[in-house]
Image: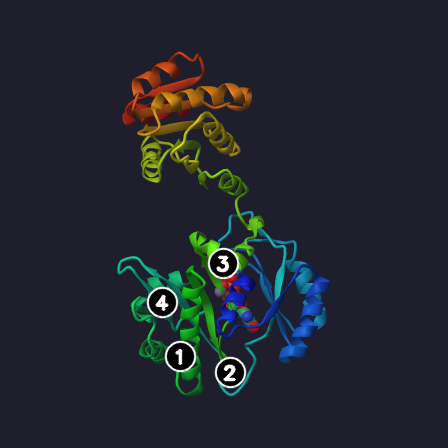
Amino acid sequence: MNIHEYQGKEILSSFGVRIQRGTVARNAKEAVDAAKELTEQTGTGWHVIKAQVHAGGRGKGGGVKLAKNLKEVEEIAGEIIGMNLVTPQTSAEGKKVHQVLVAEDVYYPGDSEPDEFYMSVLLNRSTGRNMIMYSTEGGMDIETVAEETPHLIFTEDIDPATGLLGFQARRIAFNLGLNGQAFKEMVKFVLALYKAFEKSDSSLFEINPVLKTSDDKILAVDAKVTLDDNALFRHKDYAEMRDIREENPVEVEAKEVGLNYVDLDGNVGCMVNGAGLAMATMDLIKMAGGEPANFLDVGGTADAKRVEEAFRLILKDDKVEAILVNIFGGIVRCDRVAQGIVDAYKNMGDAINVPIIVRLQGTNAEKAKELIDNSGLKVYSAVEFKEAADKVQEVLS
Ligand code: GDP
Ligand code: MN
């Protein structure tokens, strides 16, 4: 589950990670109040107004702006709230901004120049261990750094038996070129950050930039935090951070009825049981010259009700020109599934306005094919994978 920057920062701060402080606001007036309060608490004269949407690259899209007085806070907050923010990580339509974070300006002048670093915590899948990935090149696209100057990206693998050790945190601070007070602050920052990652059951932290201020403090300016859905039962307070306005509405609906659905851009809807078969089916569709419109795993119980729910979900996407049902009957018998499809089709009547290709393989596959062929409905049946692919191609052309 993804959360907003301000929520990610709340979690970090609760584990002792220093952050750029701020308050979330839903309109210009709240923004001004937040700014006044922040000045009292932190002494900041300037404020940064930051759009809160689940997408990075907000700065580039005009979603992060500096306000030098309260009038500017009001103007900028008014501009950003309600806008459709387009960033390199959103679609062309962008994302509607419902709230902003009013934060203290941390790039103030002082004895030294502020310096931006990159730091993330994530699972290293090739070693099976958590790692801290970091770079001196903060504040910019880490993908670009990886491509153009890969030697400036460092990693530190963490042994699960010992956790992050002090010497590792010191190595990170050293590799980032720090010394004196900033070095000590970075060691503290890294240790607290890793503790926060483990204790919050997160699957990703990306702090870009981590800032060294002009007075040698180290703090998180940005926070992308992804929580592990499977651990949310342990963190009721984090579960409440979910903002479904940021999620795809069809995916939200699918989750409610217990279907695994991921929206994609293509024209062929897929209804499959099992994630592996779903992936193979998407390949099959591509080979047949189509593009999958979605990933959908209906799971083990493909009865009429479930099949109907799945059809309804798939058909919410008006790009869908055909639906391929590819189900392997193991414990669930193919004839039961076929009956489910026929019943769902009859229940939904005219709601199904695209051709359906059904491939059922496994227990009672032949019987299933008979059922479909004799139903008198506009459903094409196939037993072999290849046959199904050819049918998809046929109906699309
Ligand atoms: P992102 O663009 O979505 O990654 O959002 P960030 O939180 O990383 O902010 C984008 C950029 O805004 C940062 O890289 C900074 O350059 C700038 N920024 C953020 N906070 C401050 C601040 O307190 N003062 C100033 N002057 N700039 C800031
Ligand atoms: Mn950032």
Asked if disc 4 and disc 2 are in contact, CB closer than 8 Å, the reply is no
Quarter-wise, where is residue 349 in the image? top right
Of 394 and 38, the residue lying toward us:
38
Amino acid bearing label 1: Val
Q: Is residue 59 visible?
A: no
Asked if ligand 1 lies within 8 A of label 2, the reply is: no
Task: Compute the Cα span from label 1 to label 2.
Answer: 18 Å
Asked if disc 4 and disc 1 are in contact, CB closer than 8 Å, the reply is no
Could you say where residue 326 lies in the image, as x and y percent from the top left?
36, 29
Asked if disc 3 and disc 4 are in contact, CB closer than 8 Å, the reply is no
Locate residue 158 relative to residue 197 in the image: left or right.
left
**Callout 2 secondary element:** loop
Query: Which residue is at 28% across, 24% downward?
Result: 384
Task: Compute the Cα span from label 4 to label 1.
Answer: 15 Å
Q: Residue furthest front?
A: 234
Mark 3 Cα shell of 10 Å, populated few (<14), some (14-19), many (≥20):
some
Amino acid bearing label 4: Met
Task: Compute the Cα span from label 4 to label 2.
Answer: 24 Å
Residue located beneath label 2 in the image: 214
| Residue 84, placed above or below residue 392 | below
Asked if ligand 2 lies within 8 A of label 4, the reply is: no
| Residue 112, placed above or below residue 397 | below
Residue located beneath label 4 in the image: 133
Could you say where residue 175 lies in the image, as x and y percent from the top left?
34, 77
Amino acid bearing label 3: His
Residue located beneath label 3 in the image: 235
**Callout 1 secondary element:** helix
N-terminal of the two: label 4 or label 1? 4
Asked if disc 3 and disc 2 are in contact, CB closer than 8 Å, the reply is no
| Residue 299, placed above or below residue 158 | above
- Select label 4 or label 2 by which is in front: 4
**Callout 4 secondary element:** strand
